[in-house]
Image (tube, grey):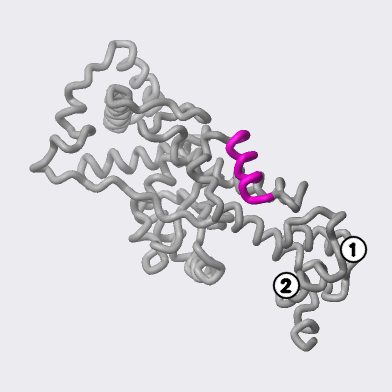
Amino acid sequence: MNKLENIDKILIKTAAQDKTGFGEKILCLSVAQNWKEIAGNISDRTAPIKIHEKILFISAESPAVKDSAKFLSKNIVENVNKIVGRGEKIISGIDFGKFFESPPKVPPKIPAQEPEKNIFSKENLEKIILTDEEISECEKKSAGIENEEQRKNLTEIFLSRKKTEKLKLQNGWHKCKICGELCEPEKIICSFCEINERDKMRQRIRKIFYDEPSTTFHKAQDKIFQEMPHMKKECTLSVIESERSSLIRETAARVSFGDKNSDNAKFLVMLLKQVNEKDLTDALIDRAFKELRFNLADRNLSEKS
């Protein structure tokens, strides 16, 4: 094992032992960088979301892909611990998120002959000068390591990270509006917060339709823009329609074909037809039930009717 590999192993081990959540972010980023090798044939239809309490959360583009990931869960766990953990048991199992996101794109390695295109090149990092206070801060972080060689290696990692942070600030990076971590100039929040906020946004969309089923797409979108302005690019009409459709299917599964008077039945028709309760009619309910006959609780009976 060369020196660089030894440093990587120490960093992964330190991240795995970190209890603040920052270590889990480092581990998840490492998993994302190696996802193609870890997940194999399903890597382009799945993506690692986060690691929490040694559980790797994965998103899948469809139920069928999710089933495939479940079947391969043992291999995925073994590959993560082997490839990223380098023998360390950094995860013990997998679970699944509620949405699919394409695997994070890892910045391509810049060829050695074109270092000028990479702002985080070795040459640029060497130009960054750390203050005595910053160096002391990095040394304190690794002071608890008894082995002298490992302590020096870990200190080098913290010094390199500090230089990278200063270089990012010089190139327009700024603190995420939510967690405070540095993120790219063109972004408002960092990638990890984007994942969490996207989930919150989808839950909020469903709540809007649940509270007022006759809400139009644009009205729902306006509400999200007001409450979560940093999610304007994410809150598309297709996302809103997806959450509304999901709520329709879930509600339909609790309604029988001939049921016209229950609260669930009325809510279902108002949601599907985007009308208020006062505008409900028997004819409208009948049409709605015919449209949804294959999604209703007694769909087998409705298929025969």
Q: Is residue 241 above or below residue 165?
A: below
Q: Nearer the viewer, residue 208 or 74?
A: 208
Disc 1 from disc 2: Cα separation: 16 Å
Which range is magenta?
Answer: 216-227
Three-letter residue code for mark 2: Leu
Residue located 44% across and 36% down the image: 190
The quarter of the picture where residue 285 lies is: bottom right
In this image, 189 relative to 271: left or right? Answer: left
Mark 1 or 2, nearer chain start? 1
Q: Is residue 151 visible?
A: no
Q: Residue under circle 1?
A: 262
Secondary structure under tag 1 reads loop
| Callout 2 secondary element | loop
Circle 1 Cα neighbour tier, 10 Å, few/some/many (<14 / 14–19 / ≥20): few
Considering depth in this image, is 100 or 290 the residue closer to the camera?
290
Q: Position of residue 50 (x, y in %)?
A: 50, 47
Query: Residue 228 appears at what percent x and percent y?
Result: 58, 35
Query: In the displayed structure, would residue 139 be above or below residue 13?
Result: above
Which residue in the rendered view is the most extreme toward the left?
A: 113
Q: Is residue 221 magenta?
A: yes
- Compared across the picture, whether 149 is left or right of 254 comes to left
Q: Quadrant of residue 25?
A: top left
Image point (38%, 28%), residue name: 145
| Position of residue 179 in the picture relative to residue 223 (left or right) | left
Is residue 194 or residue 67 the one in the foreground?
Answer: 194
- Is residue 64 highlighted in magenta? no
Q: Percent from the top left, x then y, of residue 165?
A: 33, 26
Image point (29%, 11%), residue name: 132
Question: Which kind of residue does numbered mark 1 sit on?
Answer: Ser
Q: Which mark is residue 292?
A: 2
- Residue 232 appears at what percent x and percent y? 52, 40
Relative side of 226 to 177, left or right: right
